[in-house]
Image: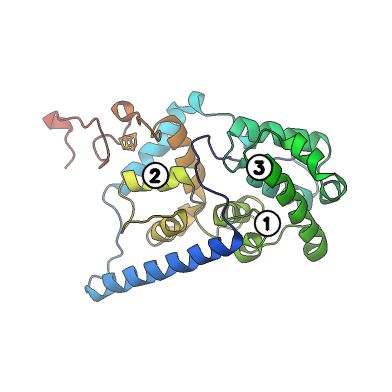
Amino acid sequence: MSKYFEKKSEEQKETINSTENDINNINEATNIVKKRRKVVNDDGNDRKWEPPHWREHWANILAMRITNKHLEPRGCDTIGDTIADEKIRRLHVLVSLMLSSQTKDTMTIAAMDRLLERGFTVQYALDIDVDELAKIIYPVGFWRRKAQYIKDTCQILRDKYNDDIPNTIETLCALPGVGPKMAYLAMDFAWKSNQGIGVDVHVHRISHRLDWLPYDTKTPEQTRLALESWIPRDLWNQINHNLVRFGQTQCLPVRPRCSTCLNRNICPASTSKDTTKHLKQK
Ligand code: SF4
């Protein structure tokens, strides 16, 4: 079985955008960031904007991941075996990402296990009937649509990429059912290339709560560009999985556990600030 990785949680609400919409969102978000950067430069302040306390926020998030480890759902990265064939490993990474959209981690892992038990390859996807494939991946979110996406994607991989997955954000986003978040994560996990931050609902929500954004953002793509404008590049590929786990165990979408959060006194959205004088943040 192949080794594959972090998945989205049940709270994930994002829709599966068409490739055209994804590209439009990227263009729109790029323009917003360019505009913002220009304003910052025109102010005469050439110091790059960064949120107050972000290094403490980040250190605390990493520390809480350790203490909350027992609460984390089993990750896809913990169940796979290493597979010798790199092309097949990359294919499994991509398919597991496609399955994970709007699906609990446990369901994604189980569905991926069933595919791996059957020796999932591009040829397997081309040979199997779409209804049969849908039954195997059920009950992942949008299982019927994803079965068709997987078959269509594998046909493209056969026709254009010699059964491998493509190695650019643009070409990955051109595959059926693959959006920017999946593309950035696939570049990182499949190709070991740190191209950008994979932004899902957890990253989007937590970035707003911690006030990590230099301006308001409405879409994950806008959030990605806003975060990339100040987060050091060597951290880009660490943001998604750490914030997703933090969002699943501590900074929950509803009723975040602020009272036990190490960031409670330096988080603008905290509902549990300690007002004791000696603990106040400077
Ligand atoms: S204090 Fe609350 S809102 Fe802020 S990061 Fe912690 S859990 Fe999230």
- Residues tagged 1 and 3 counted as in contact (Cβ below 8 A): no
Mark before the other along the chain sequence, 2 or 3: 3
Residue beneath disc 2: 205
Q: CA distance from mark 2 to mark 3?
A: 22 Å
Q: Looking at the rendering, which quadrant does residue 216 occupy?
A: bottom left
Q: Quadrant of residue 75 in the image?
A: top right
Question: In what quadrant of the picture does the N terminus appear?
Answer: top right
Q: CA distance from mark 1 to mark 3?
A: 12 Å
Whether the residues at callouts 2 and 3 have beta carbons within 8 Å, the answer is no
- Residue type (three-letter) at the residue carrying disc 1: Pro
Q: Could you tell which of marks 1 and 3 lies nearer the N-terminus?
A: 3
Q: Secondary structure at mark 1?
A: loop
Category of crowding for the residue at label 3, using alpha-carbon neighbours closer than 10 angstroms: few (below 14), some (14–19), many (at least 20)? many
Q: Is residue 100 left or right of residue 50?
A: right
Q: Nearer the viewer, mark 2 or mark 1?
A: 1
151 and 189: which is toward the camera: 151
Residue named by callout 3: 99
Quarter of the image where the C terminus is located: top left
At 64% from the left and 53% from the top, the residue drawn is 177
Indicate the amino acid at tag 2. Answer: Arg
Which quadrant of the view contains residue 184? bottom right
Find residue 66 and report its horizontal and vertical position in percent.
46, 30
Report the residue at 15% width, 30% height from top. Answer: 275
Q: Disc 1 marks which residue?
A: 176
For badge 3, the amino acid type reads: Leu
* Secondary structure of the residue carrying numbered label 3: helix
Specify whether tag 2 is near ligand 1 (CB below 8 Å): no
Confirm whether residue 79 shows in the render: no
Q: Nearer the viewer, residue 152 or 211?
A: 152
